[in-house]
Structures are given as structure tokens and as C-alpha cells.
Amino acid sequence: MRRLILLCGLLLCLGTAQAQVRDFDRITELGTLRVALYQNFPPYSYEQDGQPRGIDYELAKALADGLGLKLELMWAPPGEKLDDDLRDYIWRGRVTAQGQLADLMLRVPYDRDYAQMRNDLGELVNERVVMFGPYQRERWQLAFDRRRLPEVPSIVALRQHPVGVEVESVPSFYLSSVQGGMLSQETRHYPTPQLAFAAMQGGEVDAVMALRGEVDWLLHEANDPQLALAENAYPDMGRQIWEIGMAVHETNRQLAYALEEQLENLILDGSLERLYVRYGLRFEKPEQYQ
């Protein structure tokens, strides 16, 4: 037992020791940009027939190309919280991955309140991370099947109509509790939005609620004119629109500045919007570009 404890301690120390940030000069010297992308998260980052796909993958490749670098992917299984992901991939490293860090992580909320969040001791939770470069506005979206639900002018229309959501997601908590729980009996839970959408196609539910990007992509892939987007609002939901950006280690601001310049070019010349359209998504520019 004592040997096992010592071995575990040694592995932990080794993992931590190897978690080193590559500064911009080192990245340029090695010729690679190591980017952490969420694993199995279509339409943003996923694999198809063994090849990387998705909007975030193609954006990462465009950013690397713009800097004259080769893209090196680090697939990131999501943790329980974003704080865990930033720790594992940006500033501390994962013991199981020998402490290897990404130079850049995509799909990080660009939010001042989150960036300034403090723990019980008053310390910044993410003081070792710089969050920058907003490249997309995201929101929640409802899709429905016109064959069973003619229209959705408000969430009241969902009464007596089962709605599919991802388990433990914001739509799950919202639909289960809104207006005194009037929709709790109609809320159906699935492991992923894709399975919830498949349930709608199979007639198990009449509507699906998920991230707008996920819903847009699923509708695009389904190519069924009877599946439609709802334009209703979501009362008492709190923040319904937020911006998505990037993150680097707080010592790597030079890399952040270089990436922001590349990103701005992609947004202003329409390249990023064309990328979203190819995947069937609507692109909404971040506020600073509107």
C-alpha cells in the first residue's frame, strides 16, 4: 500500500512538472499551434470517418494557417465545469495526459462576470487564464414538428406536447421549473441533443430545445421541411444570449494578440460567416463587430 501511495504521488508530481506553457516564440519555433477542442461536440468539433470536422476545427485550422503554423489538435472530453476544463488544458494540465497543455482553447464564454469570478477566499478562480477573441453569439433554440405541433408562439403552446432536452442541461432545468413547473410532465430527457432530435423525428417528442447552433445543424442534416424553428421567447430564463470566445494562459498574451488579429480578418472578410453557412448555421457577429 505504501508503495502504491508513493507511486501515485510520483505520477502526480511528474504530471504537474510537465505542464509547461509554450510561449509565442517557442510555438513559432516549433511550427505548431496546439488547440484544445471539445470532443464529440457537433457541429463544432467532432470526428467523422476518422477525420476531424466542425466549425471550431476549421476555425482553429484557419487561425493556425494565418500564423503560418501547423494545427495540432488536443481532443478535450468536457469536465463537470468549465473551470475544470481551463485548468486541465490551459494552466495546470491533466495527470493522465502527462500534463500536456494546449496553447489555445476554443468555445470558452466571453463574459466579464465569469472571468472575474472569485472563490470563497476572494481569489480569482481563473486568474491564470486570459479569455478573449469573441467569435460567435450563442442562444437557446426550440425546434418542433409541424405535423404534431402547428406553431409555438410562446412556451404555453408546449402544454400537452412532450419536449426533448439533454439531461442536466439549462433547457432541462428551465422547462422543468418554468411557470410553476407547468411543463415538467412534458419534459423528456436524453443523453445528447442528437438523441433528443432523433426522438422528435421518431415521434416520441413533438419539440426539442438545445443550443441554437446544435439545433440549426440538426435541422440542416435532417432536411425535413416539416421540422421548423420556433421564434418564441423564454420568460424567467435569465441570460439567453452570450458570446463564445477563446482562452490562453495568462502569460501568453502575445499569442492572444496575434490570434485576435487573425480572427478579426476572418470575421470582417466574411470567411467565418461562410463557414457557419456551410454547416447550416446562422452566424451572429459578436457585439464588438456589429
Image (cartoon, rainbow, N blue to C red):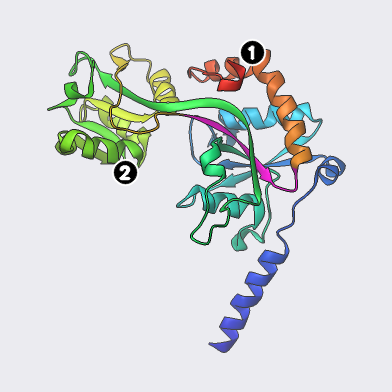
Main SS of the magenta part reads strand
Residues shaded magenta: 242-252
Q: Is residue 139 highlighted in magenta?
A: no
> Residue 50 location in percent, x, y?
57, 38
Decide: is 73 above or below 208.
Answer: below
Q: Which mark is residue 134?
A: none
Residue at 22% of width from left, 24% of height from top?
155
> Residue 113 location in percent, x, y?
51, 40
Residue at 62% of width from left, 79% of height from top?
7
Q: Amino acid at mark 1?
A: Gly
For the C terminus, the quadrant is top right
State the residue in front, 151 or 232: 232
Residue at 64% of width from left, 47% of height from top?
129
State the residue in front, 80 or 197: 80
Q: Amino acid at mark 2?
A: Val
Q: Residues within 10 Å of mark 1 (few under 14, many from 20)?
A: few
> Residue 123 location in percent, x, y?
57, 57
For disc 2, the marked residue is 167
Q: Which mark is residue 270?
A: 1
Q: Residues within 10 Å of mark 2 (few under 14, many from 20)?
A: some
